[in-house]
Image: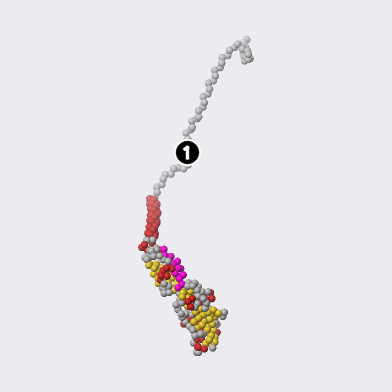
Amino acid sequence: MTDTVFRQRSKPPKPGRSSGRVEAAKPAKPPKAAKGPKPAKALKPARSSKKTESPSLVDPRLQARRLEVARGEGRRRLRWVMAAVVIAVLVGGAYALAQSPVLDVDHVEVRGTSRTERAEAVEAAGIASGSAMVGVDAPAVEGRLEALPWVERATVSRSWPGTVEIAVVERTPVAVVGTGSDAVQVDGDGRVLGPVTDTDLPVLGGDGAVAGRSLSPTQRWVVAAVADLPDDLRSEVAAASATPAGIRLTLHDGIDVRWGDSRQSTAKADAVRVLLDQADRTTIDTIDVSVPRAATVTRS
């Protein structure tokens, strides 16, 4: 009979009790070594999707053309730079020459004056001797000259290298305004020119004015009519005045001419000539040409 051996499983001893059996301590397992980082895998070179193309050869003619174009642009830039330098030099030289004594005012010549003194014209021009010729302001000089009583128009020009020329056109007196020492001559625009020097001019009514000034509107209206008269008829007029009926002219022989307004001066002058040429002029008292087509004569 087989002996059956039953092994009794030992139970752990209760605390405080000793089983009297000493068990051998199991050896401790050695600690596992720490795992290091895995070595990086070597990267494989990326395959290019495009195949490397070999450089193509450049056409020598195209390359030569490119070089020629580049050289042409360089030459054009150089020409522009040289042109700018030349212009700057010329401008600077011209300015320096204009400001130098070579081109300053040495002489002022005045032509066309008979009623205006030369010294008066030069003083009014205001051009200083030794000033730069290029600095002469011709319009301003002309304006100052035309402010003189007798000067109707002035023209200023330069004659290089150092002469300023002034050409003057003077006014023509057509009538006298005022009497005695206050009498002055006036031109057809009604501008007062100065003291009377021509006693054969028609005399206008009213008071005179300062030289260089203008007459009153009524006086200018009368003097404009006198200025429009033909020379042969104006020489027969001794006086002129304004009346409610219009302009009245008095001839040297005492005949009154009723002129009317200043319109149709040519037709009126022709009518006066015809009537004056009639016989027995000495009997004529009044001529009315205010309506030239229906001119009338009144005899004494």
- Of 248 and 70, the residue lying toward us: 248
Q: Quadrant of the N terminus?
A: top right
Residue 149 colored in magenta in the image: yes
- Residue 3 placed where, x, y %? 62, 10
Q: Residues within 10 Å of mark 1 (few under 14, many from 20)?
A: few
Q: Residue at x 47, y 73 (%)?
A: 211
The location of residue 292, given as percent across then percent down, is: 53, 83
Q: Give coordinates of residue 228: x percent, y percent.
A: 49, 78
Q: Position of residue 25 (x, y in %)?
A: 56, 16
Residue 65 vs 35, above or below: the answer is: below
Three-letter amino acid code of the residue under disc 1? Ala
Residue 259 relative to residue 113: left or right = right
Q: Which residues are magenta?
A: 135-150
Q: Residue furthest front?
A: 181
71 vs 199, nearest the viewer: 199
Q: Secondary structure at mark 1?
A: loop
Looking at the image, which is closer to me, 239 or 293? 239
Q: Give the dominant element type of the magenta stretch: helix, strand or loop.
A: helix
Horizontal relation, residue 75 to residue 176: left or right:
left
**Above or below for 294 versus 123:** below
Q: Is residue 47 visible?
A: yes
Looking at the image, residue 67 lies above or below residue 51: below
Quadrant of the image for the C terminus? bottom right
Residue found 46% across the figure and 43% down from its top: 50
Q: Is residue 181 magenta?
A: no
Above or below, comparing residue 258 to residue 26 in the picture: below
User: From the viewer's perspective, is 79 left or right of 205?
Assistant: left
Q: Residue at x 44, y 43 (%)?
A: 52
Pointer 1 residue: 46
Q: Nearer the viewer, residue 60 or 95?
A: 95
Q: Residue 65: tell me if it is visible.
A: no
